[in-house]
Amino acid sequence: MSEIENGHGLKRRREAITGLGDALRLLIEQATATEAPTEELLRAAELIRRAAAPLGERVRGRFETAAADDLLGGVRLYNPVTGAGSAFAPPLEIHRDGDGAVGTCTLGRAFEGPPSFAHGGVSAMLLDQMLGYAAGAAGHPGMTVRLDTGYRRPVPLYTPLRLTARVAGIDGRRVTVTGTITTAAEPGDVLVEATGVFVALRAEQARRLFGPVLG
Ligand SMILES: CCCCCCCC(=O)SCCNC(=O)CCNC(=O)[C@H](O)C(C)(C)COP(=O)(O)OP(=O)(O)OC[C@H]1O[C@@H](n2cnc3c(N)ncnc32)[C@H](O)[C@@H]1OP(=O)(O)O
């Protein structure tokens, strides 16, 4: 895409994607929490369809990477957990912490399972990303082959959360990673814990699975 060939164009596009992501997340939160009159819902649906139309005029195919992404550099703006451009992502922010990783996010109404608490599948999704990040940061990237989650207490909505992950063991191509979810206010009180197994791909597997994307 020529408009982002120089560095300034790329920065501007990434900012625009983040701005659109912020707007979509606001929309999803408001649309999920709303008790506005029915007429307002009908009007909003029409406005949203109109706003979506021009975005659909030029889209990428299944095996095409977003122009603003940098796959090998780890920039994935539409990742459904961490992507600033994803309407679906909380988004979870992850950074390295010593030999592990720490993440932060706050879950809104769209992630609700039991009333006022997060859906269990959402906790598993956040932990899968955390554990996968920690494996990669430790120099052992792989795909999840197993994820065990233990739900000790419900995860509250609208509450800053803190997630952790750390590599617990390496055995050939298999990396075992453990992680937790707590509130930011009470990091000693584990709400959800997980153990994941990640398997490093053989070169032939990586080619078979991701060849069409990486070219
Ligand atoms: C920053 C980025 C963060 C990203 C985080 C998100 C990560 C993801 O969500 S990845 C998406 C979800 N995962 C997937 O789709 C993976 C699907 N699985 C596969 O495609 C295949 O299992 C694949 C390619 C990973 C491995 O296939 P293959 O090499 O044939 O497996 P296989 O030979 O049976 O097993 C390899 C090793 O893993 C072990 N293993 C396989 N499955 C399991 C399991 N469920 N539990 C424990 N160990 C297992 C095997 O015992 C074997 O160990 P060893 O070499 O010691 O015998």
Image (cartoon, rainbow, N blue to C red):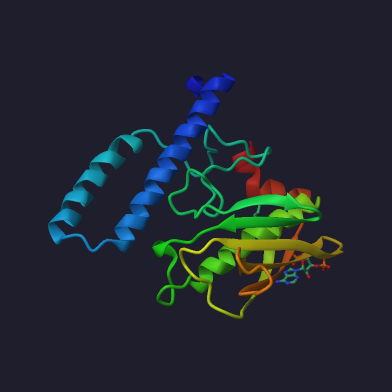
* Number of dots carrying numbers: 0
The quarter in which the C terminus is drawn is top right
User: Can you tell which quarter of the image residue 165 is in?
Assistant: bottom right
Judged left or right of residue 116, residue 11 is right
Spot occupied by residue 90 in the image (x, y as percentages of width and height): 49, 55
Residue found at x 54% / y 27%: 11
The answer to whether residue 166 of the structure is visible from this angle is yes
- Residue extending farthest to the left is 39
Q: Quadrant of ligand 1?
A: bottom right
Residue found at x 61% / y 63%: 184
The answer to whether residue 60 of the structure is visible from this angle is no
Image position of 193 with respect to 48: above or below:
below
Judged left or right of residue 137, residue 90 is left
Image position of 154 with respect to 76: above or below:
below
Spot occupied by residue 210 in the image (x, y as percentages of width and height): 64, 46
User: Can you tell which quarter of the image residue 146 is in?
Assistant: bottom right
Image position of 141 with respect to 5: above or below:
below
Residue found at x 65% / y 43%: 211
Image position of 75 with respect to 144: above or below:
above
- The residue nearer to you, when weighing 70 against 94, is 94
- The residue nearer to you, when weighing 172 against 113, is 113
Spot occupied by residue 182 in the image (x, y as percentages of width and height): 62, 69
- Residue extending farthest to the bottom is 152
- Residue extending farthest to the front is 185
Residue found at x 57% / y 79%: 153
Spot occupied by residue 152 in the image (x, y as percentages of width and height): 61, 81
User: Can you tell which quarter of the image residue 88 is in?
Assistant: bottom left
